[in-house]
Image (tube, grey):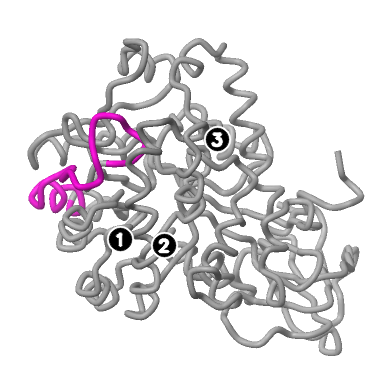
Amino acid sequence: MPDQPLLVSALQLVDGLGGPPVQDAGVLAGTDGTITWAGPLTEVPALPENCRHITMPGTLLPGFIDTHVHLGLPGGGLNAAMLLIEPPPVRVLKIAAAMRATLEAGVTTVRDLGFLGPSLAKMATTGATPAPRLLNAIAMLSGTGGHGDFPLPHAIDQAELFRVLDLRLAVADGPTEVTKAVRELIRDGAQVIKVAASGGISTPADTPDDIGLTLEELRAAVEAAQGRGRTVAAHAIGTEGIALAVEAGVHSIEHGNGLTPGLADRMARQGTFLVPTLAVMEQTGDPAVMGHHAHAKAGRWREATEKALPTAIGAGVRIATGTDAGLGIRHGQNLSELSLLVQAGLSAMDAIVAGTRTAAEVCSLGDRIGTVEPGKLADLVVVAGDPLADITLLRDPANITLVVQEGRVVKHPESAH
């Protein structure tokens, strides 16, 4: 908890609700880490005793949320052999650095959807290092030979690699095994369940057209997760995988490249979220980053994305930010997703809402974070300039001049390191 109340004021406030910005505005946070007031500075209430006041040029916003990251992967290319031979202390330090870079880029909450074991996740959840609020899936549940059960180069044994890296291998076939696997992940601390409804691009032995899990298996995963208060995020690139995941009732579709108008309409009716991960798709054009097998598969799906996202927008599908950071893009580049959403057809304001309010709802935290409103946690960001006029300002972490998490200042020019 913060040790004193905090007032942050800026040239304008964009509160995440989608309405017009408030000029010359401020946000007041109490020592319990929640927002007590927000609005124009002409209406600021009497300040509590010992209140710290930070005045910043630029725009004040809610802390951003990335609903699809992999903190356990380094970004800039995936080399399984290097992960295996990397000394464990080095890996720990790299993950801590990834957490800090993400937070200082203005992302105060993340959903990690695989490759972060429960022990290493404790660096974030115990406060051992500056880190975003973390919802961890631990592993991606896959059928045998699916997107989460893949051969590794140089004859690396996957089970051995995962053991060394404090990871979990979640492979299940049939509804009974799937139910057990979901329960085991929840037992180990998973706050969200990730399933592979289709094959993928980054793995060498499957394709996005492949069905990852059957409808019965997906339904078993959803039922088991919902029974323990968890939601299901479905990796789904190909059209058939998306269709099965939507039919099974998953909470969010991750990627969704093969989305059709009919599926988009159904997602909108059901309230199924889309996390398009445009940032990683942008990286697939470089074989040096994603590998030659991924580069060879990716072209068709990049083209599909150019059609899928406008289709989703037109149908009214709720879109949230997620980058796949760690796989392709580096940690700390998370907010590049917003400018890509604008290129795809969202307004700058709608892209900001996708990265705040809607992303909070994807995380089932819409009552606690995602907007600047009294009673919510004081997760705040200041960006130099006006992102409504130039959304690309958010791409550069250097433009994020202030980060507040639950009322605590975690990045400020005075504390630069």
Residue sitting at x 31%, y 40%: 186
Q: Quadrant of the C terminus?
A: top right
Residue sitting at x 21%, y 35%: 146
Q: Image check: 313 left or right of 200?
A: right
Whether residue 263 appears in magenta in the rendering, the answer is: no
Q: Earlier in the sequence, mark 3 or mark 1?
A: 3
Q: Is residue 350 visible?
A: yes
Check if mark 1's residue and mark 2's residue have beta carbons within 8 Å: yes
Q: Nearer the viewer, residue 260 or 318?
A: 260
- Amino acid identity at mark 3: Gly
Measured Cα–Cα span from mark 3 to mark 1: 26 Å
Q: Which residues are magenta?
A: 200-223
Residue sitting at x 41%, y 59%: 276
**SS at mark 1 in the image:** loop
Measured Cα–Cα span from mark 3 to mark 2: 24 Å
Q: Where is 319 relative to 114, above or below?
A: below
